[in-house]
Amino acid sequence: MYRKVLETSLGAFTLASDGEQLTGLWLRGQKYEKQTIHPTAVEDNDLPLFLKVEEWLERYAQGEAPSIDFLLKPEGSTFRQEVWKHLLAIPYGEVETYGNIAKKMERSHGRAMSAQAVGGAVGHNPISILIPCHRVVGSNGSLTGYAGGIDMKKHLLTIEGVQMNGLYEPRPVR
């Protein structure tokens, strides 16, 4: 298991890998940061996979929609894995709601799924940006629930050219 701390134009990230697949990508200070990183992971700044991820992040930061030509292996429950597959299906420059993802899952499972459960799985996504949890918004347009913070979520959506009218930052709870 390997890890790397990476400074990019998007910010600082911690990357994790089993040597062939990316198992984690967390923004510094992100909620659940490094939650699934192996405790014996060794620092490796020259791992070819990490160099590919770094290039991908820089291209993305420049407004490109680079394809992912390396393997992702997020660790999580079967439910979370399914939610993350739905995230991967959200096109670059578009948003989806927690509720719509829950409805899609209801249709495939034949039973009720809650938007809150989907939100929990989205929030625990261990591979930020590449598995685009930033593209998920509340059904009312609220830019809620991004583990990397609302400012970063807005920044990523702006990079992708998402029309921000109709989307808003939730008010802090008092």
Image (cartoon, grey):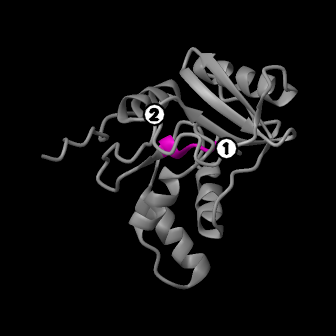
- Name the residue at the front extreme: 40
- Label 1: state its secondary structure: loop
Q: Position of residue 149 (x, y in %)?
A: 39, 35
In the rendered image, residue 41, in percent from the top left (x then y), is placed at: 75, 38
Q: Nearer the viewer, residue 155 or 27?
A: 27
Q: Mark 2 or 1 closer to N-term? A: 1
The kind of residue tagged 1 is: Ile
Residue 12 locus on image (x, y percent): 56, 22
Q: Quadrant of the N terminus?
A: top right
Residue 135 screen position, x and y as percent:
49, 43
**Quadrant hosting residue 49:** top right
Decide if residue 51 is on the left or right side of residue 152. right
Name the dominant secondary structure of the magenta segment: helix
Q: Residue furthest left?
A: 174
Residue range (magenta) = 131-135
What is the number of the mark on residue 37?
1
Residue positioned most to the bottom: 110
Q: Nearer the viewer, residue 151 or 109?
A: 151
What kind of residue is marked 2? Val
| Residue name at image x 58 percent, y 61 percent | 83
* Front residue of 35 and 85: 35
